[in-house]
Image: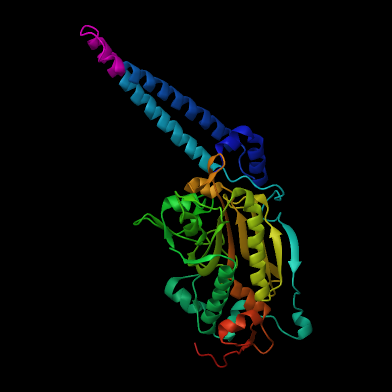
Amino acid sequence: MIDIRTIRDNPEQVKASQRARGAAESDVDSVLAADEARRSSLQEFEDLRAEQKALSRTVGKASPEERPAILAKAKEMAEQVKALEAKSDSAAAAFQEAMLKLQNIIVDGVPAGGEDDYVVLREVGKIRDFAAEGVQVKDHLDVAEGIDALDMERGAKVSGARFYYLTGIGARLELALLTMAADQAEANGFKLMNTPTLVKPEVMGGTGFLGAHSDEIYYLPADDLYLTGTSEVALAGYHENEILDLTAGPKRYAGWSTCYRREAGSHGKDTRGIIRVHQFNKVEMFSFCDAADAEAEHARFLGWEEDMLAKVELPYRVIDTAAGDLGASAARKFDCEAWLPSQNRFMEVTSTSNCTTFQARRLKIRQRGEDGMEAVATINGTLATTRWLVAMFENHQQADGSLYVPHALRPYLGGREVIEPVRGLQA
């Protein structure tokens, strides 16, 4: 949620952000109109209630002859006050509804446009020349099946399309990757958390996920709970309705959780293997920080994501996501995309978003500032997830069907340097 004072004082800034996102500028005007109606109806109610209280104080002093008229007037006024209170409550609800439609104000420098209008900030690492090595590139599913790391067929049998089993070394690889991410997070001052994967509607809505992509979220109507697509949601809700002390610096948490997404908008896209699946595991960084430090904290998150990509020795690029491809809560988002040899393209493996004070205002997470209570900022970023295995299988495949293990990952796999193919696999 945006500070209403910002919208009143600089509506053109908010409209410019909406334009860059491809969102409706008229939503800003709707908020301003609702704000005026809310304030005016509240003032009308409070003025009449003050008159009512003043009149009530005269009853005891009135003569017996005057008292019936005063009591009748007080009764009439009480009904008017009740009606104005209902009108004020309705105006307040309409204002809140209008505010929730507005997306966060983008940070200066964010590219305008949609999904294809990102800006590449840098490319890191050397892309292998498989042809020069005499290696016939296999996609991640073929590589994984060759080392008995993945079973898609039985995943579909048990749960349906886009479900899978990580088997044997596949399960070990994911555990090694996520444990390395957890170790890095703790080394950088994050508190490791195993988070709930079911949250209340006010927490899911407070993080901004019940907007345009709400159809991708699993909902359990019998319990009125949502399954989280990222531990960002549970971590954001951890300090809901609290006043934080950030004098010692940001409060940083690393959430390890299973995540659930419908992938409702991706029919026919990346249906082979585990690029787009309904369930996966992830270690997510999350920070509550002073609003003035948000951009610097965001840059630190990106640096930590790149540290992880260096550890698994993947070539990647960093993109500055265009405004129209941002989530409602994000003011800026950087993605790291690993090279995918079988498709000759880059594939997103991490995102980090600066949500400024947008989520914290919705969730009423504050700190004591020089001028009273003020909202904190929230930053999130992926440190490792199941999808990384896709890039690792493809980039580290060898001609004989084996898989190279990056140096940093070897201590988490008992020192193993290469994962050999399994010959004569039986279904």
Residue 364, x across and y down, in percent: 48, 46
User: Is residue 72 in the magenta section?
Assistant: yes
Report the label total: 0
Regarding residue 16, the answer to whether it shows in the image is yes
Q: Quadrant of residue 89?
A: top left
Task: Tell whether 74 sits left or right of 368.
Answer: left
- How was this image coloured? rainbow
Instruction: Return the residue found at the far left.
Output: 64
Residue 213, x across and y down, in percent: 53, 53
Q: Nearer the viewer, residue 19 or 86?
A: 86
In the displayed structure, would residue 102 be above or below residue 49? below
Q: Nearer the viewer, residue 168 or 186?
A: 186
Residue at the spot 77% in from the left edge and 82% down from the top edge: 131
Residue 62, x across and y down, in percent: 25, 10
Q: Nearer the viewer, residue 9 or 343?
A: 9
Q: Quadrant of residue 181?
A: bottom right
**Stretch of the chain drawn in magenta:** 56-75
Q: Quadrant of residue 283?
A: bottom right
Task: Tell whether 189 sits left or right of 16.
Answer: left
Q: Quadrant of the N terminus?
A: top right
- The kind of secondary structure the magenta stretch mainly shows is helix
Residue 253, x across and y down, in percent: 52, 62
